[in-house]
Amino acid sequence: MVLTVILNIGNTYSRAALWNGSAFEFLPRIETVRLTSAALPAGMPVVAATVVPELKQRLAGADIRFIDSRHCGCLVDFTQVDTSTLGADRVANAIALAAFHPLPAIAVDCGTAITLEVVDAERIFRGGAIAPGRRLMRHALAAGTAQLPEVPFSTELPDRIGNGTMESIRFGVDRGAIGLVRELVETAAKPYGGLDSVTVIATGGDAAFFAAALPFLQLAPDEFTHHGIRLAAAE
């Protein structure tokens, strides 16, 4: 059995999985700042998507194929958008949408950044959106102000306004993030007939939080983006 390592390199965490031709076996996630070639299984080819360009230099010498919009087969047409800075994770999400879900469809990737990827019924990538995720919003408030603390992450959606600074930040950030995703998805879906006519998939490390609060979001399986990476390399 020939195994391939499928590697999704995010801004905060990276996740590798072994593909045996029919299923994935996930390896423990690792902080991206700690990712080196020594952390990958030895002697196996690696297909990777990275949103951290300097990682390509750090992993130089390893047998790694990095996907991008120019070398990803024909599952999705990326020619209608500016691909010069299109992240490989967004390429993978668009391909996974086209391969496994009814189109038109929108992927909402909930991580350090919140991104939308829109693929129409003709498998054409139409673009999307990029916004800060919940963790980044917390960090920005603490870094950009003199008195506001960085509030710990929580999976609980606040149901009332805050009666102190910590609770107010949590209410503002977490409720605000839900409103942000709702607005982005509703607007992106309008040209295709609205939410009732579009498949909307939530993926990423914070996807469960958003899927629990927004009924129109379908929670993707863990391997969603990894499937897109492997398919991009297989074409």
Image (cartoon, grey):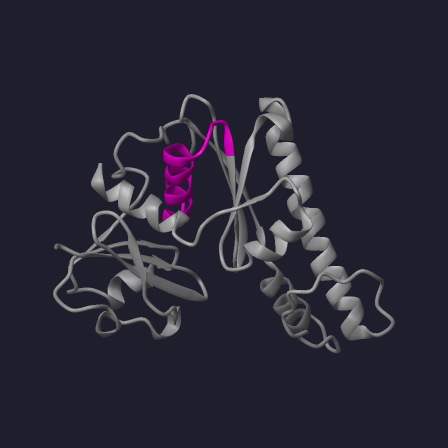
| In-front residue for pair 81/167 | 167
Residue found at x 71% / y 48%? 179
Q: Which portion, as a residue range, is magenta?
A: 83-105
Tell me: 4 left or right of 184: left
Q: Quadrant of residue 100?
A: top left
| In-front residue for pair 26/64 | 26
Residue found at x 43% / y 37%? 97
Q: Quadrant of the N terminus?
A: bottom left
Based on the picture, tell me whether residue 91 belongs to the magenta stretch: yes
Q: Quadrant of residue 26?
A: bottom left
Q: Position of residue 233 (x, y in %)?
A: 23, 44
Residue found at x 20% / y 68%? 41
Tell me: 169 left or right of 193: right
Q: Position of residue 235 (x, y in %)?
A: 22, 36
Q: Position of residue 203 (x, y in %)?
A: 49, 50
> Is 45 placed above or below 104 here?
below
| In-front residue for pair 33/155 | 155
Based on the picture, tell me whether residue 226 belongs to the magenta stretch: no
Total numbered badges shown on the rendered structure: 0
> Is 208 placed above or below 234 here?
below
Q: Quadrant of residue 86?
A: top left
> Is 29 placed above or below 70 here?
below
> Is 97 placed above or below 89 here?
above
Residue found at x 38% / y 68%? 29
Q: Position of residue 96 (x, y in %)?
A: 39, 40
